[in-house]
Amino acid sequence: MKMFPALEKKYTKDSARYLEAMRLANQIAFAPVVFQAARLMRKFGVFRMLADAKEGLTMSEIAEQSHITPYAAKVLLEASLTAGTVSCSADRFTLNKAGWFLLTDPIVGVNMDLSHDVLYKGMFHLEEALLNGKPEGLKELGSWKTIYEGLSSLPDDARRSWFAFDHYFSDSSFDEALEVVFARKPRRLLDVGGNTGRWALRCVAYNGDVEVTIMDLPQQLALMKQQTAAKPGAGRIDGYAANLLDPATSFPNGYDVIWMSQFLDCFSEDEITSIVSRAAASMDENARLYVMETLWDRQADDIAAFCLTQISLYFSVMANGNSKMYHSDDLIRCLEAGGLEIETIHDGFKGGHSLLVCKKRKTY
């Protein structure tokens, strides 16, 4: 299995010492408990209090300032102490580096909110999801076949956390992607799986002539129209309703650019090949298909790779039951099987994204 150098160094051998491995094993065994304790330390404001208190705070001061009982403060602080998010000296608690990241790092924040509001109850059904190939945990949120059908109807907390997660990881790379895409001066752009239209709005703001069509499920297009209404350039954005899981669904012709951002990871390998083969059928020799994905093997550090491979299990149990965050070899194989060839790959975009630029493979 090929990986970027930093990941290969980390994952080719076990370098943990005996007690480190035992500690990790027990952290995993109590992971739901540790997670909820950290979440409540953030929600109750304890991490913030400790961040603001240079000399630290006593347990009684924390209980009083956070408006929780002395008992609640004691069990949370003791659990947090041994979990490594706080320290204690002379009966005064201070914030550790891990606690600081839990409090301030936006990536950690969106990951934690997604885990609690979207994944937590559903993950109980992971075993049956993997055995059945269906998102068996989704029933904890609603009665849809996939989460995408229910995005506009999710419970408020789940919807807010899902979109915050989705937008954070896509929006951070848009500036770099716009430069690459518009270097070819496209006039017509097809945004496949365009969701709420955030990329489309960035495109029409970046270029005053481009026209963007968002190809997505009807219910997503309705949400997109609400989100883009009255925004600058919205008159150059329209929708094309389609169910891309239906093999009979064809792509409209005549587009200079077909854009797929954080889209193909929502499908199985066979489904990806089917989708891109239909995209390729609509392309001429001058058109390009751009695929932006967070490929776990092409990350600069093992923290990102860890997060992405855990997110794969979100797809297994909540999203659709058969997709994942892909290794680049697997995704490229699907693209090539669909009649495309990779022209260039741009790595290192913000949010850990890679941008694959594809053209239609010549047939002789």
Image (tube, grey):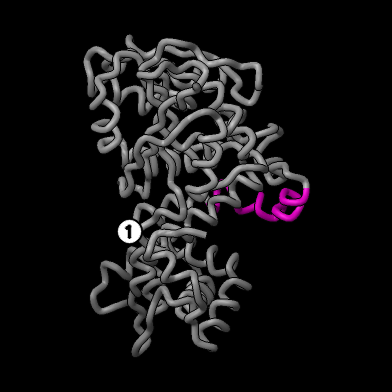
Image-quadrant location for residue 98: bottom left
Say above or below: 119 vs 223: below
Where disc 1 sits, the SS reads helix
**Res. 168 visible in picture:** no
Residue 154 or 10: which is nearer the viewer? 10
Residue 125 shown in magenta: yes
**Residue 262: horizontal and vertical position, in percent?**
46, 37
Q: Horizontal placement of 108 versus 336: left or right?
A: left
Query: Can you identify the residue that label 1 sits on?
Result: 104
**Residue 264: horizontal and vertical position, in percent?**
52, 36
The residue most toward the front is 364
Residue ID at (58%, 68%): 31
Neighbours of disc 1 within 10 Å: few (<14), some (14-19), many (20+): some
Residue ID at (38%, 53%): 107
Residue 84 or 306: which is nearer the viewer? 306
**Residue 360: horizontal and vertical position, in percent?**
45, 25
Residue ID at (45%, 21%): 224
Image-quadrant location for residue 167: top left
**Residue 278: horizontal and vertical position, in percent?**
56, 21
Say above or below: 54 vs 168: below
Q: Main secondary structure of the magenta part?
A: helix
Residue 100 or 127: which is nearer the viewer? 127
Residue 233 or 117: which is nearer the viewer? 233
Magenta span: 115-131
Residue ID at (31%, 40%): 173
Residue 67 shown in magenta: no
Q: Horizontal placement of 284 versus 156: left or right?
A: left
Query: In the image, what residue type sits under mark 1?
Result: Thr
Say above or below: 208 vs 300: above
**Res. 75 visible in picture:** yes
